[in-house]
Image (tube, helix red, strand yellow):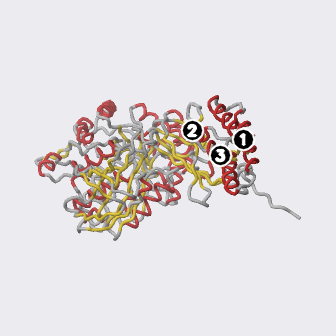
Amino acid sequence: MSTISYRHSSPIGRIPITSVSPVVDGGRWATKGVVGETVPFSAVVFREGHDALGVELLLTTPNGKTRVFRMREGAAGSDTWHTKVLLDAQGIWKFKIQAFSDDYGSWHHNSEVKLAAGMDQELMMLEGIRLFTNAASEKDRSKKSATLLAQLAETLSDSSLTFAFRLSAAEAAVLAADLNSEPIRSLVTHSDEYVINCERTLAGSGAWYEFFPRSEGAKFDAKTKVWTSGTFKTATKRLPAVAAMGFEVLYLPPIHPIGRSHRKGPNNSLVAGEQDPGSPWAIGSSDGGHDAVHPTLGTVKDFEKFVKDANALGIEIALDFALQASPDHPWVQAHPEWFSTRADGTVAYAENPPKKYQDIFPINFDNDPEGIYHESLRILKLWISRGVKIFRVDNPHTKPVNFWEWLIGEVNAEYPDVIFLAEAFTRPAMMHTLGKVGYQQSYTYFTWRNTKHELTQYLNELAHSTSAFFRPNLWVSTPDILVPYLQFGGVAGHKIRAAIAAMAGSSWGMYSGYELVEATSRAGADEHIDSEKYEYKPRDWQKAEKAGTSIAPYITQLNAIRKAHPAVGQIRNLEVHNSTGETIFVFTKHLSAEHSPAGKADTIIVIANLDPNNVSEADINLDLWKLDLGYERPFKVTDLLTGDSRSISAKSYIRIDPKTQPVVILRVDRDN
């Protein structure tokens, strides 16, 4: 009789440990984490029979010190065990689950049952004496614990005491605390060991802003009909306003020379005039390629000063890394093998039917992988030397995944603080795998998730299904994307989307002009009219502020709340709560005092009216156990947007008028 052999990463242990989390594809890739993040750990652990179990998390810090955390059992019958840990150091963490027979728990349960029934009372005392005597002699047990257990063994052996009294001595609080930290273990079993890559906080939590340097300070001479481009020097004047709004990262589209061949005109037209600057993503001209700066923006030294000025204001610069070339890029002549040639002998340009980008040649990564791989690495290292530590990567899903695994691995091995954001609006499998192989962050489908059902499903996915390997950055708009919700939502719609992104996302971002509620679309397309991708777009910020048409003060409030409340800057703690109707959306962010960097519980409740044009009402049902709050009494909250305080309870009614305050953000006020 033949047998079937199955392969396992390791044989199942004496006590089965399965479904360990957070683990990515069985441990093939590291789990993601950032400094200051609270990570939930869980496993399914069970055994034969009815004896008690103990489960612990063994977590090894980057400096090699192993910490032990007792795990708690989940829902009855689920065999799940849980704990949460705050990661407080950058580097590689390792963890495994340790299960053991809880001999004290088994003895206590049996003694309690048998003594109540008048059965084997003396025998149970003898069993206890043997158990605690042996445990007291364990070599690795602390002197304090050994003394406590030895004293308990003596109490159990004192026949002058009643059985009930002797059992109560084994139930003392001091003993429970001791056995929680130093359990009596047997049949110790370990899971496989897994890895967490804990990166700097900004890799997973931050507020991003995007602007085109050439538009900041650009001027048009009505007499000569000549445009003067903005420069790094004029763009520097905008930095204080970006910092004042609370943004930590400023993303710049490509700043390299732009090709002339097939240059696109306004709104992606095929004909460009002499004054049309072209798309920054059509990289390369006689002035240089990816390692050069567009001459109208300034010099490399000007860029380096711009970076330093931004850093002085608490802003890091994210530079676009777009691996493609205009027909005029030096690569086209020097390395024709890096591009694809069609059957008619022409070089293939970029297409995303029905869109065509005749001004851009995609890279072929297979003809000379060593050449293009190392050129890409050279370029990244060059910009790192110029002060850049964050790269927003354009269309990474159109390049081989194994290339990104190699490139990001090479960069992060030498520069662990460097962050890569994937601009990958594509299929889930590709987006998720890019996260697994190294991308610290990714754009998401959030832009198109606007209904209550869509938001509930998607935010739950981001927080609880994919957070081990996929870090979302919730952008409310981009130069390419202007969804109907914003086109027709007005000021309220822009506030609603910004508030949900800023409060729900660990990272969020917005494109310049969002604060001015720019929402006019190009006919037949969900994108901005007169796109800044193809023309200069100077904005009169002071005029908007004086007229009161800018929502910059509102954006500033949102980012201030993020900075004041560490719970908001995480994603794994997001919980969506029940509400009646289809337009009131409720979610929370919560950190217990134990897991908060400040040592104080931090709880934020967000209630949004998803209808920007109409008043909405709903009954709300909060799952208070998820917020470490009791159901028996109301609790105090403060509205962080208005400063008003009141008391609410698990069940409450709300009415939201989007014209006055479309989103309510509440802080739970409690004594920690």
Name the residue tied to disc 1: 159
The three-letter amino acid code for the residue at tag 2 is Val
The three-letter amino acid code for the residue at tag 1 is Ser
Asked if residue 138 can be seen in this view, the reply is: yes
Q: Mark 1 touching mark 2, by CB under 8 A?
A: no
Q: Nearer the viewer, residue 186 or 57?
A: 186
Asked if residue 282 can be seen in this view, the reply is: no
Tell me the number on the disc at residue 174: 2
Check disc 1: other Cα within 10 Å, few if <14, some if 14-19, many if 20+: few
Q: Quadrant of residue 136?
A: top right
Sequence-wise, the earlier of marks 3 and 1 is 1
- 399 with respect to 615 (left or right): right
Task: Name the residue located 29 percent from the left edge and 46 percent from the top edge.
Answer: 211
Residue 308, position as x, y percentages in the image: 32, 31
Determine whether the residue tagged by mark 2 lies in a helix, strand or loop. Answer: helix
Sequence-wise, the earlier of marks 1 and 2 is 1
Disc 3 versus disc 2: distance between alpha carbons? 14 Å
Check disc 3: other Cα within 10 Å, few if <14, some if 14-19, many if 20+: many
485 above or below 387?
below
Residue 193, position as x, y percentages in the image: 64, 43
**Quadrant location, the N terminus:** bottom right
Check disc 2: other Cα within 10 Å, few if <14, some if 14-19, many if 20+: few
Residue 498, position as x, y percentages in the image: 30, 54
Disc 1 versus disc 2: distance between alpha carbons? 23 Å
Q: Nearer the viewer, residue 329 or 607?
A: 607
Name the residue tied to disc 3: 167
